[in-house]
Amino acid sequence: MTSIPVPTVDVHEALRLHGEGALLLDVREPDEWAEVHVDGATHLPLGHLDPADVPSDRLVVAVCRSGNRSGKAAAVLAEAGHHVVNMGGGMIAWTRAGLPAVAGA
């Protein structure tokens, strides 16, 4: 099986896409999500990811801590026919860039 290439976007592009209606899908573990996440993101840990549970009517921006797990999630979603991109650098890059986030949930 060949994997479908998934584009990577930086955090500023992810923010722009989210503002235009893309779904930010955070695939980190619950403790990571509770520590900090993007307001309006959807939380679905990678271990529980089922492409059928993810809306397919809009772009999905996959998010994790550093970009590795979200890359795996994005590949799974792409194989299932979703229009998806991976946010490079993950929440580490997001918070370093000073972008808006919710701390402690």
Image (cartoon, rainbow, N blue to C red):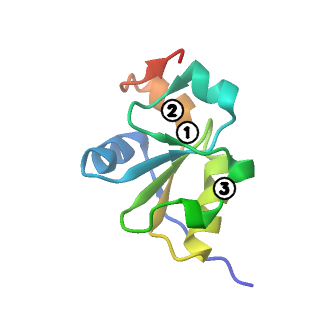
Please name the residue that numbered disc 3 is placed on: 49
Please name the residue that numbered disc 1 is placed on: 90
Nearest to the observer: residue 36 or residue 51: 51
Q: Amino acid at mark 2?
A: Ala
Residue 82 image point, x, y percent: 49, 70
Residue 65: which quarter of the image?
top right
Residue in the picture at 39% in, 22% down: 98
Numbered badge on residue 93: 2
Residue in the picture at 34% in, 41% down: 15
The first of marks 1 and 3 along the sequence is: 3
Q: Is residue 5 visible?
A: no
Q: From mark 1 to mark 2, how far is it between C-alphas?
A: 6 Å
Using residue 51 as the reference point, say whether residue 9 is left or right of it: left
> Residue placed farthest to the left in the image?
20
Q: How many marks?
A: 3
Using residue 16 as the reference point, say whether residue 30 is left or right of it: right
